[in-house]
Image: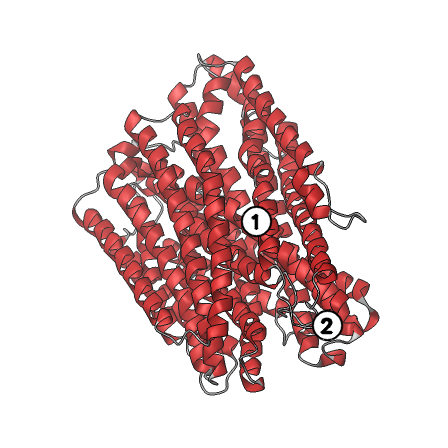
Amino acid sequence: MQALTPAAGGVALDGLNLTLVIAVLVISLIALAMGAMFRGQVLAADPGTQRMQEIGAAVQEGAQAYLQRQFKTLGGFVVLVFLLLFLLPAADMGVKVGRSVFFVIGALFSASIGYLGMNLAVRANVRVASAARQGDREGGMRIAFRTGGTVGMATVGLGLLGASIVVLIYKGDAPKVLEGFGFGAALLAMFMRVGGGIFTKAADVGADLVGKVEAGIPEDDPRNAATIADNVGDNVGDCAGMAADLFESYAVTLVAALILGSVALGVQGLVFPLIVPAIGAVTAIIGVFITKVKGNENGLTAINRGFYISAVISAVLSLIAAFVYLPQSTDAAILGVQIDGLRIRATMAVFLGIILAGVILWLTGYFTGTTSRPTNDVARTSLTGPATVVLSGIGVGFESAVYTAVIIGAAVYGAFTLGAGSTLLALFFIALAGCGLLTTVGVIVAMDTFGPVSDNAQGIAEMSHDIDAAGARILTDLDAVGNTTKAITKGIAIATAVLAATALFGSFTDAVRSTLEEIGDTEKVAADIASSFNLEIVSPNTLVGALIGASVVFLFSGLAINAVTRAAGAIIFEVRRQIREIPGIMEGTAKPEYGKVVDICTRDSLRELATPGLLAALTPIIVGFGLGIGALAGFLAGAITSGCLMAVFLANSGGAWDNAKKIVEDGAHGGKGSPAHAATVIGDTVGDPFKDTAGPAINPLLKVMNLVSVLIAPAIVGLTIGTGANAGLRTVIALLCLIIVVVAVVVSKRRDLAISGDASPAAERVAS
């Protein structure tokens, strides 16, 4: 067995290395300052007419109320996990305290990013609508993109800030403390993704089915009681949730890279993974500044140009950094073997991540873009009805998942081969590829936030009736671009999640092997290792673990989609009730009760948080303590594999359906109000929980399960072999967690679907 654990706590951080970490800290503060500047530029724009501002205020009020209730709900959970982390083994009390404290800091940072994304987006919406009203297409796009730029700068700034502070304080022990930081970020992001996704898609599905299909009124028509909730959902789901998701990807990838880097290369492996994302922070600033439309060019062309230019700059600067900072060869005293060409190998790993981001961006755009054949083919199937629309979208999702998974797999394998036979170095290069991809994350966040901001701007304009045909055309164009950017950034987020999860898998194996080395290689221990720690996939325990891991992804996705179904059912009945019971709604003389719909969405989305969260946090504990380390390794491998395919399938199917609807609404195949339009609305309705609830939530799910596994691995090993072995305690822990998960799933399944003939099913649901 290769020695994997130099004395991490003995890693010296001084001289040039100390200076570089301080420089990274300074860059993080600069990124935060640039974010504040972009925010000021957005808020300085014209807020629009009085009616626009009133509608925007209603959306802002609903979004803030939801997030405040969500954070209050999650506060107790964060405190509980903070205390539970003290039960896990650590090198000393300082590391144990730091891990728990930075778990809370990671959770707070994730929540802050989400809140910032929501808070600015709801204020930018009206400003984009106002710019379109004045015929300023370029100005509207700039406002929307710099809103995203603000969130992007905050994402990279807080990520680098947290990581650099931990490294400065804990030095060689930083990776262990950062496990807590990453876990806090991932856990909050998962809850925000799931909760926000349920909220937004319940409102969206309810609004579309009752408004467009049943009542025959346009999307975002003020006569639809679900319109305000739909706009609120865009902000709490697509803005807050996605921002938190990308932040935790940033944090978790850094955690994995620092863990593996410090073991493989010592202090240089601790510092270099900070340098690469810091370069990304600088290039993100450049990317936001240079993203401008030229004349009448398509907005997506301008955004893609900014992305690719910033990616090239990141690649060049990373090359320079590797050749200036890294030695030519690895340290044989640390790694156990000397490997030449370290600079070029590290550079190639970073390049792989950057190239992967560009390829995924293109591939996802191909399968979901309004000008590409796959999406246009889905739109054409609307001529034969909603069933063929649904079938064609599913086909697009399945096919795109294969290509995306193969490309991600090729990147992982490419990074692995750079290790020159050293498994540890190869795993570090995989994490470094993730860091390379992270150099683009600032622009990616900007691209993603562009989508819901432009979507909401169109909704506010339509509800206010304060915009002419030319302005409406500008907003429609921006919304179409936003739909595509949302889709392609989901693809990149998935790639980031897989790279991070794979690197964390390497961190997990390191944690296992280091603990085994600490116990010692006695005859009894050797026998226990042979029986309990077989990580080969052909081993039955490992294969069973892989099956369970894949199953968790499917169960998690099903729970999320069923939650949307239940919540949407309540929304549909409530909107129908208001149309039926409140005179003058359809005539436009009476105002719907928007607040009731917002309350239903808030209540139902928060109620559904517990089961997916418990499933993610406890299933690794069940498998690890119940079936052993080998099964847990298989569990993680199965989850990563199925999660990658499932996330891409859900995201791209939903993206294709969404843009197929846009194609028809722009006049193809009969345009708005035609049977083809109704068919694409059904397809988009199916796709909504696919692409905006279940699919995106798989990203943090994978990282939560991997981080839990990394955290508990030493405890599992300690209870399995050596003098501390205790099979009874392991079994009790596994059974208790299993009971909790089973009860949570049963409770979730017993909830009413809100499908009945009662005139007021929502009331029944409240009572139940």
- Between residues 167 and 49, which one lies in front from this camera angle? 49
Q: Position of residue 372 (x, y in %)?
A: 64, 74
Q: Is residue 734 above or below residue 43?
A: above
Select label 2 or label 1 by which is in front: 1
Observer-nearest of 42 and 178: 42
Write the residue at 52% across / 62% down. 489
Q: Nearer the viewer, residue 287 or 119?
A: 119
In the rendered image, the vertical position of residue 140 relative to residue 527, given as above or below: below
Question: What is the quadrant of residue 582 in the picture?
Answer: bottom right
Q: Secondary structure at mark 2?
A: helix
Farthest-out residue, right? 384
Q: Is residue 396 toward the left or the right of residue 651 in the image?
A: right
Q: Quadrant of the N terminus?
A: top left
Whole-Å distance between the Cαs marked 2 and 1?
A: 33 Å
Q: From the top left corner, tell me how far across and down residue 144 is, in percent.
A: 45, 71
SS at circle 1 = helix
Q: Which residue is mark 2?
A: 379
Image position, residue 539 (x, y; %): 63, 29
Dot 1 amino acid type: Thr
Between 502 and 460, the residue placed more toward the observer is 460
Residue under the point 57% across and 82% down: 473
Residue at the spot x=48%, y=51% of the render? 65
Q: Which mark is residue 486?
A: none
* Residue type beneath disc 2: Ala
Locate residue 726 relative to residue 16 in the image: left or right. right
Q: Position of residue 403 (x, y in %)?
A: 63, 59
Q: Which mark is residue 602?
A: 1
